[in-house]
Each structure stands twice: as structure tokens, then as C-alpha cells.
Amino acid sequence: MAVLNKIRQRSVFLIIIIALALFSFVLADVIRNGGLSSQNSQNVIATVNGEEISREEFAREVEAFERNMGRNISTTQAVNRIWDQKLREVILEEQVEELGIRAGEGQITSLVRSQMAGNPNFTNEAGMFDENRLREYVANLKETSPQAYEQWQQFTSNLANTARLNTYYNMVSAGVGATLLEGEQAYRLQNDNINMKYVQIPYSSIPDSEVEVTKAEIKSYIESHPARFKTEAARSLQYVIFEENASSEDKSEAKEAITALRAERVEYNAAIGANDTLPGFDNTEDYSDFISNNSDLPYENRFKFRNDFTGENAEAIFNLNEGETFGPYEENGYWKLSKVVETKTIPDSVKASHILISFEGTQLGAGSGRDKEEAKQLADSIASVARNNADKFAELASEFSADTSNKEQGGDLGYFTPGMMIPAFENYVFDNSTGDIGVVETPLGYHVISIDDQTDAARAVKVATIAREIEASEKTMNDLFNEVTKFEINASEGDFTEVAKKENYEVKTVKDVKALEENIPGAGAQRRVVQWAFEEDAEVGDVRRFETTTGYIVAQLTSKKDKGLMSVEEASSVVTPILKKKKKAEIIKNRIKGNTLQEIAGNQGVSVQTADAVNLSSPTLAGAGEEPEVVGAVFSLEPGKLTEPVAGEKGVYIAELVSKFEAPAMDSYKGFAQQESAARRAQAGSRVFEALKKKAEIEDNRSRFY
């Protein structure tokens, strides 16, 4: 009681303490999520030039895209596709609005006409698009189906946006072109050419040991070329994969289970309230039912030839006598028992034609106006006519067959092998002879079948196979979980690599994973691992376990790189060769002596080379490759003159102009100007968007949500 009294006396004090604790908890969450606007940021996938893209709207579009694509695309791929679409939409919409572009009724009508031109509901008797029919259709939608009318309005709204964008792109294209002077320049670039001689002193003539590139020089080069060395935020990881594989005990149990299915077994039957004897694989008479109830793979109720069997046991299974069993054998993750249940000597392929007579109630029989008995009588009658005159079969197929896919080809089905046709149809064509004509019933109706050709007969077997998948047992999975957890704890407390090495685990590394990537080399799509690596509270050295579809991954974050310029170490492989080339060029230039190409070549131990018919459009030197700076320097010379030493792509060059050919002037360069204009306009749309995208202020939050 004394304790309760003290609590009552200090209740106000306790309330204040609890309130402060709750406030500090909330405040910490606000700070961790980016301030007081965090609630708003949780609903914004991105901000583009101040315009927010709603997370809910973005998610709906991603889900719709995934549904449309089925299993052909991952969530991350769908997110990136919708992101590109939304980015283009927002950036271009801003431009369209700023310019005050609107879609006229005529533009929308024109787009509707082009979209609906092939729809028979909107064409007149002459096959032309009829705008009045379209108006009637829309008016009817408005009266009878508000939902469909709303979809129509959305459709026309999208067309209006398309019309506005078309206007914008047309305006951009109208401002892009080439003048007659630029047309002349294009003509000269392609047709003016020179003959030249040159000496090339290759950079390889200076050993790398003579030039040293310092970190300070690399850093200076990076800072002088920031656009080239921009880098996104990235993370590096090392990880160990743990596969959920079946143990040797699991394999033995699966083998025992499938072996036990061979013999009869007694089981309690609740329906009769007593034990019941069930047939085994060795004595069952219904293989389809037995396999359906006992196998992890379905029954293939078809005949196979030798070439249809694959694997190391193919020959042994195919050569079994009828009623003999092979196995158990392990194949593709299963234990299997295979039994030859029937053998035949049949053609390995048959060519046939058919006339399908359907009736009311069958898939293709709606509107036929005939019942089953009438269809049978018609099929028998057609078969009788065809037997008397086989040449009439094609004509009869064209007139009577319900199979529109081949009726105009005389019902020709081409060649096919066992297993490709409905069983009753297949049995007839493989069990009878070339030239036979008969009637067979299937769920589609009655088929009048003509066997047109059969290949040579060969042995075929029908094999029943029961299969039991070799899976990890619950005990194996529990043991793996304990193993993984133990490694995770030890790796967190010690050295990740050393702990893995001690347990003989393979450590894999991945460098510079970006925030929106999902694939980890060696592990496949592991989006959750990448998300964790970019979480704000993830620190270098942290270790985390992740479940995968086939087991677990234990990953460690080994480095964090912020957005900005590459470090000296990262850029070294790119910058070092550039700086070495520059330094070697200076050394070579200082060593060059002589007033003629022959003197220079003799001093440098190289030869004088020639290049004829070189132009600025394709500045390639025979024996040296593309050297635009060298060719450009020679074009500016007078015949017989030498260039100063020029640092090219593969070495330092001194060149001499031998002769220059200037193409004859044209009366007009309009054709070349038009070619240049067309080439530029073809790229205008994509280039203007890339320019707008580069200029835009984009805050991309996708990695928080996906």
C-alpha cells in the first residue's frame, strides 16, 4: 500500500517522464527520416523541378505494368521502366505548359481517325472511316455505360496529350536544320581529300619507367574534367551463399519412398471403415491414376521413339520389354522408376488432312444448327464421297470443315509425330495405312480423316514413370538455419573473411553496387541485400542474413561511397594512361631532330609512310588508324610543308602535305543541307529530352520504396 501511495503522490511527475520519453522517440524518428516533412516524403517517390510524383500513383502504374508483362520482368525492371516514362511525362509536360501548347479538336479527331481506321464498327459501306458512326457510339456509351464512357474520355485525353507533344516536337524540329553553308561544309568534308606522307613515333617507344604519374596529377585531372568522372553513390559487399540442398539422408529417404511404391500396400480407407489393399507400380492397371496420386511429375500418355529419350539411362529404358521396370535412378533432382507399359511398331511421323464437322455444344459448333446425330451422318456421307473420289477431299474441306485454320488448304495438317494430336485422332492415323479415310469423334466434333503419307515404321514405347523430388527435409533446413545463424554471429563479432575461411566457405565480393540495382554478381537478383546496404543506419562492417529462394545469403558491407567525383584510386585506371601519353608526347617532341621527314625518320629509327585520298569525314591513316588531329593539321598546310609535332592517338606525328584535291564547286548545296537537316531532326527529339533531363532538378527516392 505504501508503494501505491507513493505512485499516486508522484503521478504528475511520472506522466511528464513518460511524455518526454515518447516525445524523444518521435523526435528521433523524425530526425532519422529527414525532418518534420518526413510524413510527406513517405508519399513522394520523386520530385522533378518541384513537382512531386505520388508514391501511390507510381505504385499502381508499376503493378499494372507487371501484370501486363507477366513473369517476363522483375519488379525493379518495372520500376525503372515506369520511372523513365514518368520522368519524360513530367519534364515534357512542363515544357508544353510553359509554351502554352494546346491540342485542337481537329488534331484529336485526326488521331482518333488513325486509331480507329481499321475498326469495322466505325466504317461505312465503302470501308471508309465514318465520323458520324463514332459520334453515335460515344453518345451511346455516355447514356448506357458511365464506366466505359469514362475510359473513352481517358483515351481521348491521352490522344490530346499525344497531339500536344507532337506539336512540341514539330516546333523543336522546325528550329533544327542546316544552312547552305553547312551543306557546303558537309560536301567538302566528304569530298575534299589529300595525299600525305608522315612519320609516326609511337608512344610505346618510351618505356613506362621513364614517366611517373602522381596522385596529385590524377586528382588535378579529375577536377579539371568533373563531368567525365561523376559517380553515383555505391556500396561494396562480400558475402557467403548457403544453399538449401538435400542431405544424403534426404536422398536415401526419397529413394526408399519411391521403391516402396512398387509393391501392394495396405491402408485404412475411411470410406469403407476398414483397411484396403492398394495396387503398387508393379501391378497397377491404371497408370495415369497411379502416377497422378503418387508422382511429382505427370504421366506422359504417348508413344516415344529412341530419339525422344535423353540422359544416361535412355538406352536402358527404351530397350526394356513390355512390363519391365528400370530403377530407381537419379535424374534432374528426382528419384525415378520407369516401366514400359506398351510397345508398338508405328511410323515416326504421319501426314494427314481432315474435315471437322462440329455440332451445337462443341467449341466450334455454335451456330451450326446441327445436333450430334446430324453431324455424324454428314461426316459419314462426306467420308463415303471422299473414299469414292479422293480428289474431292480438298473441295469438301473448303465447303464443310469448321477448322478455318486449314480448310482453304484442303484440310492439310502437314506432318506430325506422336503426342501432337488428340488421342482418338492420333490412334487412327498411326494405326491405319496411307490412303485410308475414316471418321473419328473427338471433343471438337467428328473428323473425316485422310491419311496422306506415313514415314517408315519403327519401334515405339509408352513409358510410365513415377518420380519423387529430392528435397531438403525439415531437419536439414533447421540444421542449415543453425549453421547460417552461427556464421552470422561469428562474422559479426570477428573477421568475416577469416571466419568463412575457417569453415571452408567461399567468400564472394561485389564492388560499387548502385542504389537501384538488383543483381549481385554470383547471387542473381537480391534486391533486399542492396536495399539494406543503402539504409542510413547501415555501417561499414555490418553483417546481415537474408533468406533467398534457395537458401540464405550472409552479407557484410565493406565500403560506402557517396555521390560525387571518383576518388584517385577509382579513376587511376582511366587517367594514368592519358597522363602517361601526354608526358611521353613531350619527351618524344623534345627528341625530334631534322628538317625533313627522312631526317626525322632516320633519327627516330622509324620509316616514312604514305596515306592517299584522306578526307576529314573519315580521317584514317593507312597503318595508323583514325587520327583526326593529324589529318586536320595537314589540311591546313600548303603542299610541301611539314606540320609541327602532333600528339595523336597512337604516337607523335610529323606530316607533310603532298597534294590536295578540292572537289569542284556545286551550283547548289541544297541537297547536302537537306541531308544534314534530316539527320539532325531525326535526333532532335531524344537530344532535347536528354538536355532537359540534364538541366532538371530531380530528387529520386525510388530506392527507399523498392
Image: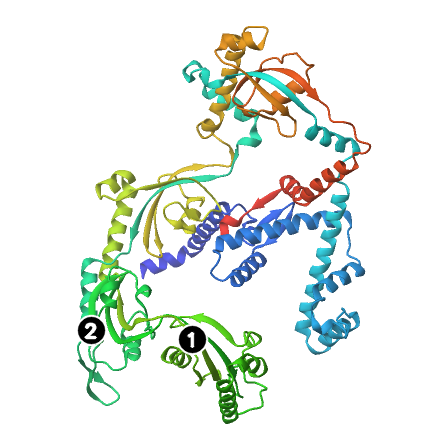
Would you call the spot at circle 2 few (<14 residues within 10 Å), some (14-19), or many (20 or more)?
few
Mark 2–mark 1 Cα distance, whole angstroms, equals 28 Å
| Nearest the eye: 563 or 411 | 411
Determine whether, in the image, residue 361 is placed left or right of residue 690. Answer: left
**Residue 437 drawn above or below residue 537:** below
Q: In the picture shown, does residue 700 fall above or below 606?
A: below
- Dividing the picture into quadrants, the one containing residue 178 is top right
| Residue at 80% from the left image edge and 60% from the top image edge | 106
**Residue type pointed to by label 1:** Met
Question: Which residue shows up at 65% across the image and 16% down it?
Answer: 658
Q: Outermost residue toward the top?
A: 594
Return the x and y of residue 244 as percentages of the image width and height.
28, 56
Residue 469: percent from left, percent from top = 27, 65
In this view, the residue in front, 585 or 576, is 585
Q: Nearer the viewer, residue 357 or 290?
A: 357
Q: Residue at x 33, y 56 (%)?
A: 550
**Disc 1, SS:** loop
Query: What mark, if any, has residue 421 been given in the picture?
Result: 1
- The amino acid on which the numbered mark 2 sits, given as a three-letter code, is Glu
Q: Residues within 10 Å of mark 1 (few under 14, many from 20)?
A: few
Using the image, tell me which numbered label, if any, was put on residue 324: 2
616 lies left or right of 321: right
- Residue 44 visible (yes or no): no
Asked if disc 2 and disc 1 are in contact, CB closer than 8 Å, the reply is no
- Residue 416: x and y in percent read 43, 70
Asked whether the viewer can see residue 292, the reply is yes
State left or right for residue 96 relative to residue 705.
Answer: right
